[in-house]
């Protein structure tokens, strides 16, 4: 499955700067496509970034209805057909909201790994009352307070407070259930848009991971599609090293692993978040359910079975779809 990040934020906050620097620093080994929803020149020179394809999708400004969706989706499909990227970064126009783009990418079967809102720490006061700017914050789950070189610590704290307040007020909600869509979000600081690689990894939290496992039975019948996931339950008497071995022996088809495991030699349960060949571990205070690993990738059924043959502490239940 192709992964994607959406980069939003008001005009001139540093979205393109962040994209260029981030891709150079953290994704130079990946086939990256950069899509910019904007008019005219984008200032990203594909030639200075290796393995990067960039394209400007000129979409009618301000129109966030189905017309944008159609234009955007066909543009993205064309890029996928032409270039076959592993990761797509979409920079939205500074004057538009990210949520329609989020839906479009999901419609296309592209995994949206995060919606990043870049904030101009120096100039937020001049634009924070703009309603688009507020919805950009409300519709994101990763905040990047940029241009920290232009403010002092107190000013940066004030910016953080502003962002938290706007987020509280404008967090997007599911219109049917009234529940907020991004319950968890992170606030990072940056200069020239440069953030650590973890910003692109540890986005999904425990409740979302468990929720995913519970959806498993729904998803199982789609195994002929390219996007699949399999949940493995782990036996109790395992050590941290066992889990590490699994992650070191993943077949190419599995590119994402999420999970929560309890092991004998670490006191706390551990959240595992593996992507792009990198893994992060985070200790949890408590987790009273069975240890699980969720393998996500393309046509992974066989490979997961082979993995279970190799590691007998992995158990993948075989559900049948009733007809
Ligand atoms: N001082 C400073 N300038 C920055 C920083 N990030 C971006 N800029 C500048 O801000 C301007 C707008 O950046 P750009 O990435 O084009 O913003 P965009 O419209 O959000 O894509 C450019 O002149 C950048 O060089 C930063 O961290 N510090
Ligand atoms: Mg830009």
Image (cartoon, rainbow, N blue to C red):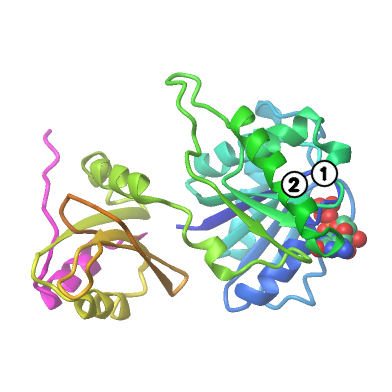
Whether residue 188 appears in this view of the structure is yes
Give the image location of residue 217, x and y in percent: 21, 42
> 110 left or right of 189?
left
Determine contact: label 2, label 1, CB under 8 Å.
yes
With respect to residue 30, does 78 lie above or below?
Answer: above
User: Could you tell me which quadrant the N terminus lies in?
Assistant: bottom left
Q: Nearer the viewer, residue 107 or 246?
A: 246
Q: Which mark is residue 124?
A: 1
With respect to residue 314, does 249 lie above or below?
Answer: below
Whether residue 98 appears in this view of the structure is no
**Residue 273 sits in which quadrant?**
bottom left
Q: Which mark is residue 273?
A: none
Q: Secondary structure at mark 1?
A: helix
Mark 1 closeness class: few <14, some 14–19, many ≥20 residues within 10 Å: some
Give the image location of residue 2, x and y in percent: 50, 58
**What residue do we see at 28% from left, 43% from top?**
219
The boundaries of the magenta stretch are 297-323
**What residue do we see at 69% from left, 38% from top?**
136
Mark with earlier residue (2, 1): 1
Q: Nearer the viewer, residue 86 or 164?
A: 164
> 90 left or right of 233?
right
Give the image location of residue 302, x and y in percent: 21, 66
Q: Which mark is residue 159?
A: 2
**Residue 306 sits in which quadrant?**
bottom left
């Amino acid at each position: 499955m192709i992964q994607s990040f959406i980069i939003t934020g008001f005009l001139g906050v540093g979205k393109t700067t962040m994209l260029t620097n981030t891709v150079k620093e953290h994704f130079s080994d990946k086939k990256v496509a950069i899509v910019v929803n904007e008019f005219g020149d984008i200032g990203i020179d594909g030639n200075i970034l290796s393995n990067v394809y960039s394209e400007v999708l000129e979409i009618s400004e301000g129109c966030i209805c189905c017309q944008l969706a159609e234009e955007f989706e066909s543009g993205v499909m064309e890029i996928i057909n032409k270039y076959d990227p592993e990761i797509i970064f979409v920079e939205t126009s500074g004057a538009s909201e990210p949520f329609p783009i989020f839906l479009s990418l999901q419609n296309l079967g592209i995994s949206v790994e995060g919606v990043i809102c870049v904030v101009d720490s120096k100039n937020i006061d001049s634009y924070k009352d703009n309603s688009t700017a507020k919805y950009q914050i409300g519709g994101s789950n990763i905040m990047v307070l940029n241009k920290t070189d232009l403010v002092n610590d107190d000013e940066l704290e004030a910016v953080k407070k502003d962002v938290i307040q706007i987020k509280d007020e404008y967090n997007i909600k599911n219109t049917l259930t009234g529940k907020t869509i991004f319950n968890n979000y992170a606030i990072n600081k940056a200069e020239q848009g440069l953030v650590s690689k973890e910003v692109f990894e540890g986005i999904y939290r425990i409740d979302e991971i468990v929720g995913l496992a519970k959806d498993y039975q729904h998803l199982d019948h789609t195994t002929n599609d390219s996007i699949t996931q399999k949940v493995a339950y782990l036996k109790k008497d395992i050590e941290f090293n066992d889990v590490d071995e699994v992650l070191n022996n993943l077949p190419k088809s599995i590119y994402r692993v999420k999970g929560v495991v309890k092991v004998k030699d670490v006191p706390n349960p551990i959240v595992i978040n593996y992507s792009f060949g990198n893994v992060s571990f985070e200790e949890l205070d408590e987790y009273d359910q069975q240890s699980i690993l969720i393998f996500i990738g393309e046509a992974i059924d066989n490979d997961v079975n082979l993995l279970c043959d190799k590691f007998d502490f992995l158990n993948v239940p075989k559900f049948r779809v009733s007809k």
